[in-house]
Image (cartoon, helix red, strand yellow):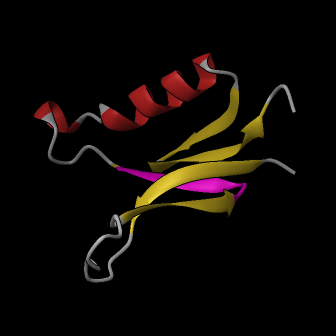
């Protein structure tokens, strides 16, 4: 199983001396919400295809869906 490390912002209040950004682990598969492109020029999705192509070019096993991209791990794992 592939484990992805993501930098995520917690919704908790900022505690003095502690960064609101922290490392957390998320197990695959992971869904990245990109939107359908309804607000893009011509209603054509831009973000979803760009995220899909960038991950694919970096060797990730990804699938493109309407409004999101699913990451199923790295092809070299």
Q: Which one is in front, 22 or 17? A: 17
- Residue drawn 62% across and 55% down? 30
Farthest residue to the front: give it: 17
Q: Is residue 61 above or below residue 68?
A: above
In the picture, residue 26 is in which quadrant? bottom right
Residue 28 coordinates in the image, percent (x, y): 72, 55
Residue 50 coordinates in the image, percent (x, y): 40, 26
Q: Is residue 6 above or below residue 41?
A: below
- Residue drawn 14% across and 46% down? 39
Count of numbered labels shown in the rendering: 0
Residue 71 coordinates in the image, percent (x, y): 65, 44
Q: Is residue 1 above or below residue 58?
A: below
Residues shaded magenta: 27-34
In the picture, residue 15 is in which quadrant? bottom left
- Residue drawn 25% across and 33% down? 44
The answer to whether 22 appears left or right of 36 in the picture is right
- Asked whether residue 30 is drawn in magenta, I would say yes
The answer to whether 42 appears left or right of 56 in the picture is left
- Asked whether residue 29 is drawn in magenta, I would say yes
Q: Main SS type for the magenta part? A: strand
Q: Quadrant of the C terminus?
A: top right
Q: Which one is in front, 15 or 21? A: 15
In the picture, residue 13 is in which quadrant? bottom left
Q: Which one is in front, 24 or 58? A: 24
Residue 4 coordinates in the image, percent (x, y): 67, 49
């Amino acid at each position: 199983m592939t484990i992805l490390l993501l930098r995520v912002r917690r919704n908790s209040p900022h505690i003095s001396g502690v960064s609101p950004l922290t490392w957390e682990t998320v197990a695959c598969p992971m869904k990245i919400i990109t939107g359908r492109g309804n607000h893009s020029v011509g209603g054509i999705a831009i973000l979803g295809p760009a995220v899909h192509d960038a991950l694919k070019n970096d060797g990730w096993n990804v699938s493109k869906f309407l409004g999101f991209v699913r990451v199923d791990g790295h092809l070299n794992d």
